[in-house]
Amino acid sequence: MSHPLPFRQIGDFQITALSDGNMAASLDLLSGIEKADADIIQYRAGIDRPGDIHINCYLIRGRGRVILVDAGAGPLNNVGGQLTANLAAAGVSPDDVDSVLLTHCHPDHIGGLLDPEKQPVFKRADIILHPLEAQHWQDDKKLNIANERGQRNFRLVRQTLHAYARKVRFFNGDKIAEGILPVWLPGHTPGHTGFRIDSDDQCLLIWGDIVHYPHIQSAQPAVSILFDTDPAQAEETRKSIMEKAVSEKLLIAGMHLSQAGFASVLRDGSGYRISYAEK
């Protein structure tokens, strides 16, 4: 029996969490915490595969728009790849999507933009990202000093942006649509961006990759992951957005939250706690 997809209604917008599945990873990717301590946090949170990272994408529908936020890992390396099926379960075909908003350009966020033949999956959609993100991945100096995995990432980003070349648009700080604003959250990557949806006095923040291991990095926001371009800036951004989430009682959506898709952030001692939101 299939479970209904988790969603929230924020005024005129319905936001649906679309799981792309799990990425096999390791708590060794973290710095600023002993692996044994990280294991304990995961164990106490009831997570049976403590090193895995879950991948979410989000579908925003309302006011005549069909917007996808991130596209998962796609057919890459047997990671994830469940987005297409979950999009269909939500009653949406790739051709229905008018815009794909990118939080950033790591492979588990853009892998689903191209099919196995490297052709665009979302043929009618604009691809919208932060200009600093595009600059970062188009920078040959950065490409040349990247390690082998990093160079693969650079090539994938360039290939993807080239395939969608006529459809690529950049945020300029203005609203994407009435009620949807980009929020620059730098550190994980230079152009890492969240999306704030405000409608009828309700608010949801899709915060991208503020956390990869939600329970660990909320309890200890100083913990960073190997994929952070600027770990110090990522930590500063994580702390400030978590504080904002607590003080404004924001509903949070994140690309590496659990399949539940939506959460609140609560203050807990010197750190915070992720509480998966009940409807």
Image: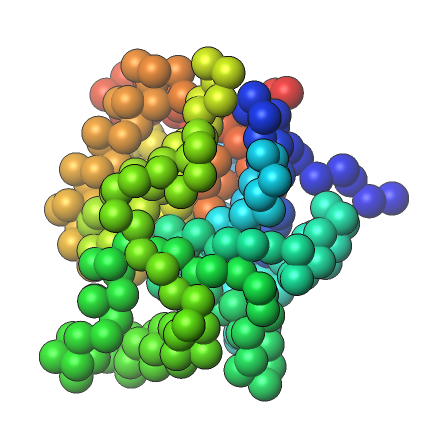
Residue visible at 44% across and 67% down in the picture:
167
Q: Nearer the viewer, residue 177 or 196?
A: 177
Relative side of 258 to 268, left or right: right
Give the quadrant of residue 208.
top left
Residue 87 position (above or below residue 239): below
Q: Which residue is nearer to you in this view: 226 or 42?
A: 226
Relative height, residue 245 to residue 213 (above, below): above
Using the image as rendered, state which of residue 104 and residue 149 is in the foreground. Answer: 104
Residue lying at 56% horizontally and 21% vertically, measured from the top left: 11
Check the picture and name the quadrant holding the N terminus: top right
- Quick one: quadrant of the C terminus? top right
x and y percent of residue 249 in the render? 39, 16
Task: Identify the residue at the far right of this view.
Answer: 1
Q: Position of residue 38 (x, y in %)?
A: 36, 42
Name the residue rendered at 44%, 52% in the picture.
101
**Relative depth, front residue between 176 and 107:** 176
Image color mode: rainbow
Identify the residue shown where x is 71% and y is 58%: 93
In this view of the protein, can residue 250 be seen by the observer? yes
At which x and y percent is residue 78? 59, 72
Q: Is residue 11 above or below residue 67?
A: above
Q: Percent x, y for residue 151? A: 29, 80
How many numbered circles are shown? 0
Q: Is residue 273 left or right of 236 when viewed as pictured?
A: right
Observer able to see residue 228 = no
